[in-house]
Image (tube, helix red, strand yellow):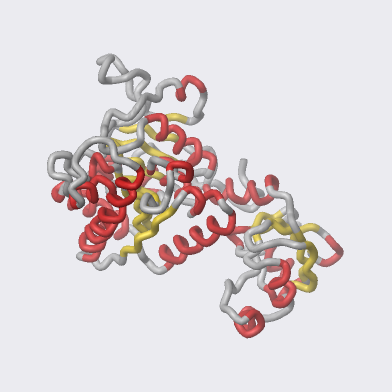
Amino acid sequence: MNATEDKPLPEPANAIQRLRDARRVVVKIGSALLVERASGRVDADWFRALVEDLVTLRARGQQLLLVCSGAIALGRRHLGLGSGALRLDESQAAAAAGQIRLAHAWQEALGEHEIPVAQVLLTLSDTEQRKRYLNARGTLQKLLGLGAVPVINENDTVATEEIRYGDNDRLAARVAQMVSADCLVLLSDVDGLYDADPVRNPQARLIAEVHELDDRIQAMAGESATDTGSGGMITKLAAARIALGAGCHMVIANGRRPRPLQALEQGAACTWFVAGDSPAGVRKQWIAGSLRPRGAVHVDAGAAAALDAGKSLLPAGVVRVEGQFERGDAIAIYGPGEAELAHGLSAYGAAEAGRIAGRRSADIASVLGYRGPDELVHRNDLAMIRRKA
């Protein structure tokens, strides 16, 4: 299932290496772990231990994104909303009050290690509507490039029930898909997926690895056992489907252990959902065969040779632009002799691409009046159709 120009990531020697080998990791933290039920405050001891794990990953050169629940749980205490179900407007108010506390906790904790933190609030529309998806993806990619750790949550302050994920498991999977993460860690209050309810059946067996989400696996899902969070095993399997489709390994692990990520690397009980291809391979396959090009660009011999060498397409090598396409649309790339070379996602719409065709990247700002990407199609958004002999 690999794209022609990409080899999949090497399969780790054993399961406990998957987290260590990942270049880009998304960690989802549930509110039942982060917030003490009795006090409604951040569990300081648990939080400090988790931060030690995150600092270790960063020290190894791994990029981190955190999808963190808990804003409503923190905010409801601050606003005196008490226990029990909240109305939509109460949830939104609690989220507004709690989100600033949640962000401050992360800023202080990671700031002690000189790790910059950025808050990103997303809604369902941000991951489903193409332009908003591209903007969110670009922001996250830039933050990672600048060395920051994005702390992401659903924007419960403005999202209505109709446009909410309602759980951060699936949101975390969408984020992993968006940034082409290699590994998604769902820290939960259970060890993983069991073949039966372990509360009711002491003989229930933990499933160590899942390679296919068939009906048998789906039937093992149950409801959430906590009232602090909104996720359950059903939403975790939905997240796994998204992650595996993006070439991202996913693991469900018990976050209540001290140093839960360290425990995972040391072989703690968990359930791994194993992807069959790398994020890059899946993405390039999707670009090459699943998207219908909305337009085309024709390039000169130099640009064709650069594409064959695995480089990005720069405006300087473009000799003609055809069709009506928008930023983020798939386009076909043709070389001399009208040979179809590649498909890619354009960083510019057709009108802008036509204006910068044949120009140096340094001239883009003066031509368009704003500074855009140097590449018309970045190599990460490009899949070769024809390879050089």
Asked whether, in this view, residue 118 is left or right of residue 38, the answer is right
Q: Quadrant of residue 346?
A: bottom right
Frontmost residue, 321 versus 269:
321
Tell me if residue 125 can be seen.
yes
Which residue extends farthest right?
Answer: 337
Q: Which residue is at a point 33% across and 24% down the rendered structure image?
A: 206
Asked whether, in this view, residue 169 is left or right of residue 389, the answer is left
Q: Picture coordinates of residue 147 (x, y %)?
A: 37, 66
In the image, residue 387 sits, relative to residue 267, either above or below, namely: below
Frontmost residue, 99 versus 169:
99
Asked whether, in this view, residue 315 is left or right of residue 20, the answer is right
Q: Picture coordinates of residue 214 (x, y %)?
A: 51, 24
Quarter holding the C terminus? Answer: bottom right
Asked whether, in this view, residue 44 is left or right of residue 190, the answer is left
Tell me if residue 42 can be seen.
no
Frontmost residue, 17 versus 67:
67
Q: Which residue is at a point 59% across and 54% down the rendered structure image?
A: 130
Frontmost residue, 97 versus 264:
97
Quarter holding the N terminus? Answer: top right
